[in-house]
Image (cartoon, rainbow, N blue to C red):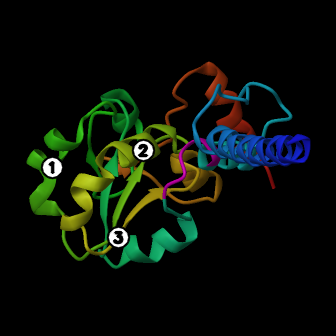
Amino acid sequence: MIRRGHRRMRALAAVAAIAGALLAAALTWTLMTVPGPWRLDPADPRVSLADVEREVARRHPVPDIAPAALAPMLAGGKVVLFDVRTEEEFAAGHLPGAIRVEPGMEAGEFLGLHRDRLGVAPVVFYCAVGVRSSQMMMRTLERIAPHATGGIYNLRGGIFRWTADGRALVRGDAQGEAHPFDANWGQLLSRSIAAP
């Protein structure tokens, strides 16, 4: 009787250990994939655009595309671009041919307005650094994926990376410039453009 009790206790202890390990693994996965507080201060001179890109990818794990890969697609006219920024930001400068969409737009509204633009060409969302555009992707991906057979991507580093890499923006028929979003993000933009 006592041996049977010990076996049960050891079995329960083993089950508890396994359950604890599974719970710890689930919690670790959740902390890694569920956005938490923003970890970086763009005004901190130690923070680079690459740091921001990593943080965006951590918080919003969506497929992305580097500016170097997007540039030839854009030059060939084989991409659909959605700019997920405010009117003021868009007016300062944007990628040629981009269509501005409200940052908080829901999937149904997006699909209702832009379904006819989706098809075999890759669809790329972008914003200042990738936060709002990746959030838009996460909200709309399931609904728009069946209509965008060329793939859906977030521009890694957004307008900041595009500009820091020396690529041009447009403003009507003139040269555009990257809008800094606010003074703190403007410091990061200035550092990124000045970086070798």
First along the sequence among labels 1 and 2: 1
- What label does residue 151 carry, if any? 3
Disc 1 is placed on an element classified as: helix
Residue 97: which quarter of the image? bottom left
* Residue at horizontal 65 percent and vertical 44 percent from the top: 26
Magenta segment range? 58-62
Please identify, in this view, whether the residue under mark 1 or under mark 2 is nearer the observer.
1
Q: Residues within 10 Å of mark 2 (few under 14, many from 20)?
A: many
C-alpha separation, residue under disc 2 versus residue under disc 3: 15 Å
- x, y (%) of residue 153? 42, 61
The kind of residue tagged 3 is Gly
Disc 3 is placed on an element classified as: loop
The kind of residue tagged 2 is Ser
The residue that disc 2 covers is 133
Tell me whether the residue at label 1 lies in contact with that at label 2, contact meaning CB atoms closer than 8 angstroms. Answer: no
Q: Is residue 75 above or below residue 24?
A: below
Quadrant in the picture for the N terminus? top right
**Residue 61 on the magenta span:** yes
The residue that disc 1 covers is 111
